[in-house]
Image (tube, helix red, strand yellow):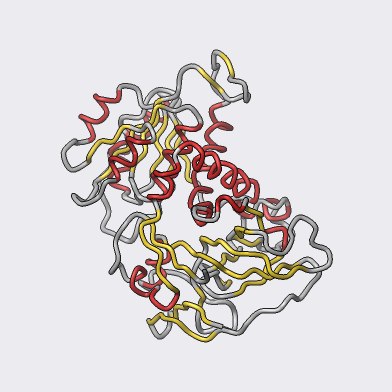
């Protein structure tokens, strides 16, 4: 079968013939891949910045943002049936007994660093025609979400970040809780850095959670990302014409920041304006660049005197995937046009090298593996 793979040692990538899988246990599922999203991680892997093939292979099949259809199941699989749409998680546990996170099914918090990841680290990804996987990592998706379910995995970044945010902010003496037991009252002014897919989906999640949300980003002149964001109720501020001090003055108190750019210099500049009791969520992974200057005394002083929290979040749990599927449904009901506009282009597998090489622009490009 066909697959899109990278050969790190040869510094090349392209469409190859890859062995077709087969079920090996009664707990596995065979999935026909329909669509795979392309993100910055994929572009960095084909740029040979990181990514590692499975043991014994000289190539890595790309792709971790999946949408497929179940075509075969092992005898012990009960929560899926043939014809179900499905999204598969990314990270697999390290298998080391002392790792309590992986033993608890939370390999997104793996202590050892010996985990593997589909399409990223030591495990082939989803940019191929068929995939076999253990059913516990496969999440059914309503058929009504066929056109947008490939966005589930990038949304899980926000799902995990917001999950941790609420856990951390339980420390505060909130005045009351809402009908869902979430804190209410103060603390609902959010700033999102970046208007790529992770930033836009994070904005939708924060609005759904009740935050007044501002997005700060540079946007190409031909793009209507600002209009998309305004259509869902967010405020957009163009970083090309507004500096960070002016942005902070316009916003007033910034209760939380959701960073989705990977630009460390911007993140630390904005961090200076985080409000009292605020939380700053880092999701980006900066490339290797020269160091930038930071006032470490002010950084430490503010964290202490203002009761602030800064944390990073990577990967996601099965529960985060399930919540993302539910929230994609909520987005589709509330903002159907805006959600659909996040996907700019769909390209066939044989043409996937074009968006991976950066030759096709847009918000989110998707590889259509099958119709």
Q: Is residue 202 left or right of residue 91?
A: left
Q: Nearer the viewer, residue 320 or 268?
A: 320
Q: Quadrant of residue 123?
A: bottom right
Residue occupying image coordinates x 39% and y 61%: 365
Residue occupying image coordinates x 20% and y 29%: 246
Give coordinates of residue 359: x percent, y percent.
28, 69
- Number of marks: 0
Q: Residue furthest left?
A: 241
Give coordinates of residue 196: x percent, y percent.
35, 50
Give coordinates of residue 192: x percent, y percent.
37, 38
Q: Is residue 231 left or right of residue 219?
A: right
Q: Nearer the viewer, residue 328 or 182?
A: 328
Residue occupying image coordinates x 61% and y 74%: 130
Task: Give the answer, above or below, for where 39 lies relative to 272.
Answer: below
Task: Give the answer, above or below, for where 85 lies relative to 371.
Answer: above
Q: Residue furthest top?
A: 175
Q: Quadrant of residue 47?
A: bottom left
Quarter of the image containing the N terminus? bottom right
Give coordinates of residue 140: x percent, y percent.
66, 54
Q: Quadrant of residue 22?
A: bottom right
């Amino acid at each position: 079968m066909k697959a899109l793979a990278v050969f790190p040692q040869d510094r090349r990538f392209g469409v190859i013939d890859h062995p077709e899988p087969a079920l090996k246990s009664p707990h596995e599922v065979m999935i026909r891949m329909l669509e795979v999203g392309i993100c910055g991680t994929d572009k960095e892997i084909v740029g040979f910045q990181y990514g590692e093939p499975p043991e014994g292979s000289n190539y890595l099949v790309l792709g971790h943002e999946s949408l497929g259809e179940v075509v075969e199941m092992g005898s012990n699989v009960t929560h899926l049936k043939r014809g179900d749409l499905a999204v598969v998680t990314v990270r697999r546990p390290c298998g080391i007994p002392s790792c309590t996170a992986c033993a608890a099914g939370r390999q997104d918090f793996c202590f050892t660093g010996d985990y593997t990841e589909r399409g990223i680290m030591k495990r082939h990804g989803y940019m191929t025609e068929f995939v076999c996987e253990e059913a516990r990592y496969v999440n059914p998706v309503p058929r009504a979400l066929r056109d947008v379910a490939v966005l589930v995995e990038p949304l899980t970044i926000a799902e995990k970040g917001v999950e941790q945010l609420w856990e951390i902010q339980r420390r505060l003496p909130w005045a009351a809780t809402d009908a869902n037991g979430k804190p209410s009252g103060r603390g609902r002014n959010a700033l999102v850095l970046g208007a790529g897919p992770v930033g836009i989906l994070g904005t939708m999640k924060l609005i759904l959670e009740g935050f007044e949300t501002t997005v700060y980003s540079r946007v190409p002149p031909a793009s209507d990302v600002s209009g998309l964001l305004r259509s869902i109720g967010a405020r957009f501020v163009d970083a090309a014409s507004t500096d960070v001090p002016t942005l902070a003055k316009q916003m007033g108190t910034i209760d939380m920041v959701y960073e989705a750019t990977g630009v460390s210099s911007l993140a630390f500049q904005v961090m200076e304006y985080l409000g009292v009791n605020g939380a700053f969520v880092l999701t980006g992974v900066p490339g290797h660049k020269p160091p930038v200057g930071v006032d470490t005394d002010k950084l430490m002083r503010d964290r202490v005197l203002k009761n602030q929290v800064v944390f990073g979040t990577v990967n996601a749990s099965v529960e985060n995937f399930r919540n993302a599927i539910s929230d994609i449904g909520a987005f589709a009901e509330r903002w159907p046009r805006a959600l659909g506009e996040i996907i700019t282009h769909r390209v066939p597998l044989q043409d996937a090298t074009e968006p991976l090489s950066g030759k096709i622009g847009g918000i989110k490009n998707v590889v259509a593996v099958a119709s």
